[in-house]
Amino acid sequence: MELQKVQEEHANTNSFYTFLLIAGIVLVAFNLRPAITSLGPLVGMIQEDIGLAHWSAGLLMSLPLIVFAVMSPIIPKIAARLSNERTLLLGLLFLLIGICIRFIPMAFFLFIGTLFVGMGIAIGNVLLPVVVKDKFPTKFGLMTSVYSTSMGLIASLASGVSVPLATGLNLGWQGALIVWGIPALVAILIWFFLLKFNRKNHQAVRNVRSNSNRIWRSPLAWQIAIFMGFQSFLFYVTVAWLPEILHSHGITIETAGWLLSFTQLMGLPASFFVPVLAARFRSQVWLAFILGMFPIVGYGGLLLGSSYPVLIASIILIGIALGGCFPLALSYIGLRTRNTSQAAELSAMVQSTGYLLAAVGPMFIGYLYDVTHVWTVPLITLIIVSVVVMTFATASGRNQYVQ
């Protein structure tokens, strides 16, 4: 009888820990995009208030990606010393500090705060797939679906409410940005509790060990990295400049902000179902090819179309593409590796090189607009990048493992 009671208590403890861990994973996912996606619709206000050129505003959007590229290779080493949980908590603290610094309406503090934001998000980007593969090895596809969909949902909300928060509630662009410190604070509390729970129940804290550089010599790893990089290029360019592109078609900037939110909402079904489908098959070539066609047609519609229905159809296709490509890239990290150590190495390598490519996006597209004063050349560039995304997504989908 007493043994049965102990077993029940142990089962309840494990169930509570699992629930708390899932909540912690989802809350980290909540914080991996809003601090960036909330910037896009506010770029015009920030430029007017602080006096940033288009290329400077593009640099502001690119800065977190540069930080991702620089920090990603060292994150597994930090996690090996501190543990995954402590490192994630450290990343959330960096994120909150950065969000608070950006409240000061000066260009210097805006860029410094964004630097801290990038540091915090970089840690979550690298470690979240590793934690999921470690804690839920048999449910990797489903858990990737859960957290990538959560990420897309909160990102779309951030894009849609930024302008209403700034103008409708008279918070200004600073207030509209600092609002996203709330989910960061909640996530900090959850992960702090998870650490205490681990210590109290003597549960082992798993570390990431990454002692090999062989991953950098793997052709498959480079294919995944290029896919990750250019799909991120498309995402962050879209977040930064889609409202301005739609505004050039005669749509008000507030409506354009909501259409950016709508674009991301259209990607939520893909965010959920793509990893689940990917995990069901050994090869994802067909899935990657179909998904890769969507942005080609979508950006082509923005280039050639001028009517409202064509614009809506185009942003729906773009939304599906962006919503599906990112979780597919995350799925490859788990599906193309044999263990957690390989997953950590691949995650760091893919996100480092991938985000280095992505960092070029918003600044380069902003520069092209500054030079041409029309969105034709930038959109042609996005179509070319979409072809690259489809090519490397398909190559990465073959049934093989990184060496």
Image: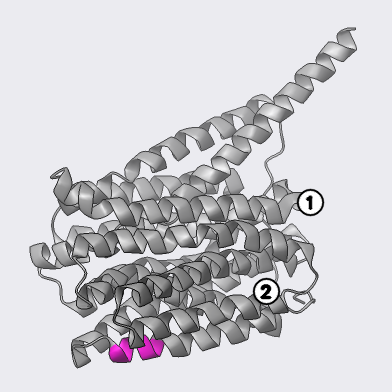
Rendered residue at 60%/33% (across/down): 20
x and y, in percent, of residue 33 in the image: 42, 57
In the image, the segment drawn in magenta is 376-381
Quadrant assignment, res 271: bottom right
Secondary element at image label 2: helix
Check residue 120 in the rendering and tell me which mark sits there, or answer none: none
- Given the image, on which type of amino acid does mark 2 rest? Leu
x and y, in percent, of residue 335 in the image: 74, 66
- Quadrant containing the C terminus is bottom right
Residues packed near mark 1 inside 10 Å, few (<14), some (14 to 19) or many (20 plus): few
Residue 259 in the magenta stretch? The answer is no
Residues packed near mark 2 inside 10 Å, few (<14), some (14 to 19) or many (20 plus): some
x and y, in percent, of residue 295 in the image: 48, 79
Residue of label 2: 287
Check residue 138 in the rendering and tell me which mark sits there, or answer none: 1
Color style of the picture:
one colour
Rendered residue at 54%/53% (across/down): 149
- Given the image, on which type of amino acid does mark 1 rest? Thr
Q: CA distance from mark 2 to mark 1?
A: 21 Å
- Quadrant containing the N terminus is top right
Q: Is residue 161 left or right of residue 200?
A: left
Rendered residue at 58%/34% (across/down): 195
Residue depth check, mark 2 versus mark 1: number of the one nearer the observer: 2
Residue 380 in the magenta stretch? The answer is yes
Q: Is residue 22 above or below residue 215?
A: above
Rendered residue at 34%/86% (across/down): 303
